[in-house]
Image (cartoon, grey):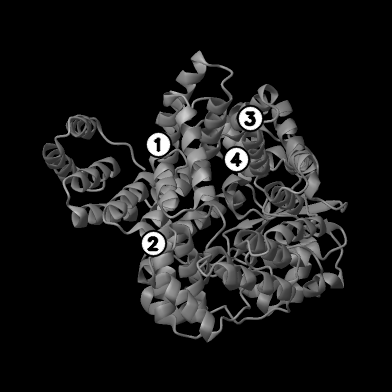
Amino acid sequence: MPESGPDIEEQLKLVRTRMYEGQFDAALRLADSALRADSENIDALYMKAVCERYLGLGDGALASVERLKSLSPDFGRAHQEEGHILKAAGDLDKAMIAYRRACQCNPALQASWRAQAEILESRGHHDAAKEMRGQEQRIGNMPKPLVVIANLLYEGKLLKAEAACRRFLQNNPQHVEAMRLLADIGSRLGILEDADFLLESALEFEPDNIQVRIDYIQVLRKRQKFAEALQQSETLYRRQPDNPVFQSLYAIESMQTGDYKQALELFDKVLHRLPDDPVTLTSRGHALKTFGRHEEAVLSYQRAIQSDPGHGDAWYGLANLKIYRFSDEELHQMEAQESGNRLSYQNRIHIGFALGKAYEDREDYDRSFGHYDRGNRLKRVQSRYDADQMTRELDRQIEICTEMLFDKHTGQGCDAPDPIFILGLPRAGSTLLEQILASHSQIDGTLELPNILSLAHRLRRTKQAGNDSLYPDNLFDLDAEQLRAMGQEYIDSTRIHRSGAPFFIDKMPNNFRHIGLIKLILPNARIIDARREPMACCFSGFKQLFAEGQEFTYGLQDVGQYYRDYVRLMDHWDNVLPGAVLRVQHEDVLDDLDGQVRRMLDHLDLPFEQACIDFHQTERAVRTASSEQVRRPITRASVDLWRRYQSHLQPLKDALGNKKMEPRQ
């Protein structure tokens, strides 16, 4: 959330002072004044709600909380305040829901744990209350500065949290909880190397600290250190083989290394102990889907929904199979969940996108778009994406990555010819191209690997998160040994995903932003640009809920601007790296599969193999949204689907403009 300006900060300090003095009338007037200057100030809205509650203005307090949640759905104190208001009104059931959501958003809210314990104790649920009291005590035992830092962290004030945590660690350099918090901040800022180092160090001080090891596993996974993450999760599992949390972690890391058999066995162990756990059932469904076991995936998702009808991830898991059709009963269930007030924010997003797909299949395109649009609006509130900032970043690639840069570094980098990069925009047909090429005996299909993005991020940042970016300007300063080492690091770090073929595919779509870096560190890498007709590509992205990243897709104008920037940058790469990129138009693949397959294999200097034409018969794990579609013969069913929604797509058309965007031949 945005940081407030100095004048607002002074006003808010005065509001806090009046609240501490018990002068809630005066504090409310000051908060209202601050909101007239900045109507979306989160802290001012929060203090307004607190003042209204203390003044007995329950309806006004709830209205302020609703406004607060709409602006910042993951702001834990908003949900806590809602709990306080509802508890005071005697609505303990709804209060418990609010407190639970508060703790999900911000586990450092001691008052929410205490309030849940009090409600549970009043109802005789002493075992559950004891667990809440334990959490309350854990926070109470933390040094006060760390509680403040945790609250800043969970409220998204990352730079303030980082500065405060570094100050604390200067005086307490081996405080493990502070190291864990700073690692969490670094992970959220994308500074994964620092987070990795902090957690590794913390484990040396406290090797039996379970939470630190779990955090370490998650950071290793983000860094694509899958072998190390698997080893750490196995350490926990071997310590307590019957612990369902450790079983689940080990299963997830087994999936990341491609061992789906072991992952499914572990999920089954969890379900033996917790047969109705919706999270495990959904994770198992994801694994089965990736492994191509469609019918079993459906059953696993459906069991999760039977256990918890509001578990949005399972509903969207069904929708994201693409070929699944919801029954009338399932549609009514989702509608009932969406219209109620018990869904968490994330579940509301998942069910919104699932309803969009359900009505799309029923050819009720107006209602379908309404749900897609609401899901995107909810998702966009959580996003920090700035379309103009992205335009500036891509402009900088054009300014810096000139012929002069590539001439300077000619003959440098790692000469490995192994990687084949398929890039472009998501939903442009890259999964189909990967499935086709991975059916060739000399090519391994892998994942959307973030390794290039990580290398770019390392070049981009300096030690302090707030400094200006050095990348891509510093590409000029890299010497031959640095370029070779970075290329070799890429080859080594991606080896875990390969199965022994001489070539492998990296299909991270966002790599199109970094073709300059790719060709400097891996000059012999082959690149294929998966291109799709603009309206079809952009709308397909808009109606897809991505697991992470791709934040430009959550608004029609943003996705249109991104497409324009992408085309402009790809034109630049064509100019400065002529012949380096093969452009493959999705519609051409649908019309002439044989011709396009031969064209791609010629670009890769590989012989034709019939298996590439019969790609749908290839058995392999596919993790993207198109996983089920690429296991079937080619169809043109969705090529012109966007035309059914034309009446809603004017903002997209305006963003794309009148520029002709046909690919270069």
Q: Please tell me in which quadrant of the rendered image residue 205 appears.
A: top right
- Secondary element at image label 1: loop
Q: CA distance from mark 3 to mark 4?
A: 42 Å
Task: Work out which quarter of the rendered image holds the C terminus and state it.
Answer: bottom right
Mark 1 or mark 4, earlier in chain: 1
What residue appears at the point 58 percent right and 32 percent down from the top-left corner? Answer: 459
Q: Nearer the viewer, residue 238 or 173?
A: 238
Q: Which residue is mark 2?
A: 377
Residue 7 visible, this angle: yes
Question: Relative to residue 489, is residue 369 depicted above or below?
Answer: below
Mark 3 or mark 2, earlier in chain: 3
Q: Which residue is mark 4?
A: 403
Question: Relative to residue 620, is residue 171 depicted above or below?
Answer: above
Q: CA distance from mark 3 to mark 2?
A: 36 Å
Amino acid carrying mark 1 in the image: Lys
Q: Nearer the viewer, residue 97 or 402?
A: 97
Task: Work out which quarter of the rendered image holds the N terminus and state it.
Answer: top left
Q: CA distance from mark 3 to mark 1?
A: 21 Å
Mark 2 or mark 1, earlier in chain: 1
Q: Which residue is mark 3?
A: 199
Amino acid carrying mark 4 in the image: Glu
- Secondary element at image label 4: helix
